[in-house]
Amino acid sequence: MASGERPLNEVNFLTVAEVASVMRVSKMTVYRLVHSSELPAIRVGRSFRVPEQAVHDYLRESYVGRETA
């Protein structure tokens, strides 16, 4: 396990609908992010699950007002 990674039993996974709600975007936007590999996800049957931390990381990295060093 790489440093900073949590064991899978401690990872909280969100559905596409839950991610869309958190990000206040459509489910289609979430699917686009997943398919373009901008948002990591695992496939469970015919649906996707996104690690909650990945959503928070994506939003933090995408913040327009952030300062770059």
Image: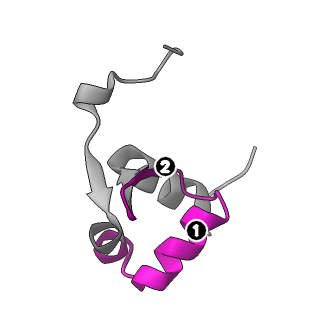
Position above or below: 14 against 51: below
Q: Is residue 18 left or right of residue 40?
A: left
Q: Is residue 21 visible?
A: yes
Coloured how? one colour
**At 36% across and 57% down in the image, what residue appears?**
45
Choose mark 2 or mark 1, whichever is in front.
1
User: Do residues under tags 2 and 1 come within 8 Å of each other at their CB atoms?
Assistant: no
The one of 49 and 53 positioned closer to us in this rendering: 49
Position above or below: 60 against 47: above
Element on which disc 2 rests: helix
Badge 2: residue crowd in 10 Å (few <14, some 14–19, many ≥20) = few
**Residue at the disc numbered 2:** 57
Q: Which residue type does callout 2 highlight?
A: Asp
The one of 52 and 44 positioned closer to us in this rendering: 44
How far apart marks 2 and 1 lie (CA) works out to 13 Å
Q: How many numbered discs sit on the rendered protein?
A: 2
Badge 1: residue crowd in 10 Å (few <14, some 14–19, many ≥20) = some
Query: Quarter of the image holding residue 19?
Result: bottom left
Element on which disc 1 rests: helix
**Residue at the disc numbered 1:** 33
The disc label shown at residue 19, or none:
none
Q: Return the x and y of residue 5 as percentages of the image width and height.
A: 44, 23
Please identify the quadrant where the C terminus is shown: top right
Q: Range of the magenta residues?
A: 20-46
